[in-house]
Image (tube, helix red, strand yellow):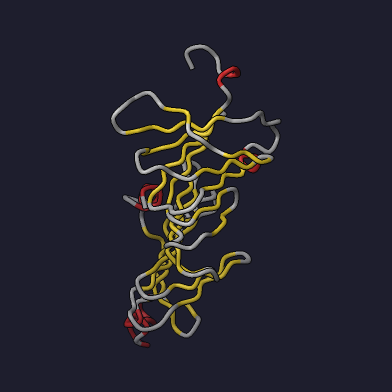
Amino acid sequence: MQELQKHYLRVPVATIEYNHNGQLLNTNDALLSGAYTHGQIKITYENALEIHVNLGWETSWEVAKDETTYTLPPGSFCAWNDKGLLVYSADTGIGRIDYAACEEYLFVDTRGHKLQFGPVTLDGSAVFKERKWEIDVVPFSCESDIEVNVGQYWPDRKLPRLRLLAFKGDTDEPEIFRAEMEGDKVSFKPDDDAVMYRITLPEWMVEPGQ
C-alpha cells in the first residue's frame, strides 16, 4: 500500500462511480437505483489514478484492464494509473493474491502458492528492489526456493556469475550465501536468520569502496 498511498493522499477526487449490473453510475443515480448498497465503487483522482474497491460482502466484481480481468471478491481492490503503477488484492485467474508493481519495487504475496510474476518465482511473499547491478530481495514466509531471472531485469547486459549476499539483523556486514545460477536465473532458499538478500556482481568486478 505504501506506493499507492503516495498517489491518492491529498489528491482531489475527480469522480466517484458505483457498479450496477456492469454499468457505472454517478452518485445521484446510484442513490436512486440503490446501487450504492452493493459497495462496488470506482474512484478516479485528478492525477488519473483509478481505484476499484469491493466493499460489499455478498458478490464479487469483475474489472478489466487491457487484457487482464481482475475478480474482486468481497473486501478486495485493484488500482492503477497510466505511469506503470499497478496494485491489487484480487484474483486474476490463479487465486487471490496481493501484488504491487511500481518504479521503486515489486511486492508479491502468493498466499502460499508457487507462482511466477515476470522475472520472479516464489511461494510466499517478498519485496524486490532493483538498482544498478543490484537486486535486493526481502522475503517473508517463503517455504521453497525463490527464483529471480536477472536477465529480465537487465536484458541488455552480458551477465557474469553473480553473488548472493545475505544480510542479518545483528551485523552490518553481509555474508556470501549459497545460490544456484543457471543461465540468467538465480535461485536460493531463504534462511530464517537473514532479513534481506542482494544479488550483485562478483567481487572482482566491484570497484574498491563500493
* Observer able to see residue 199: yes
Q: Residue 135 versus residue 12: which sits nearer the camera?
A: 135
Q: Residue at x 47, y 13 (%)?
A: 209
Left or right of 166? Residue 132 is right
Left or right of 121? Residue 46 is left
Count the marks: how many? 0
Q: Does residue 194 sit above or below 125 in this rendering? A: above
**What residue occupies the far bottom of the structure in this picture?**
33
Left or right of 37? Residue 113 is right
Q: Residue 111 versus residue 100: which sits nearer the camera?
A: 111
Q: Does residue 178 sit above or below 123 in this rendering? A: above
Residue 57 on image: x %, y %: 33, 80
Left or right of 4? Residue 144 is right
Residue 49 on image: x %, y %: 45, 56
Q: Residue 87 versus residue 147: which sits nearer the camera?
A: 147
Q: Residue at x 45, y 63 (%)?
A: 97
**What residue occupies the far top of the structure in this picture?**
208
Residue 45 on image: x %, y %: 42, 58
Q: Residue 160 versus residue 207: which sits nearer the camera?
A: 160
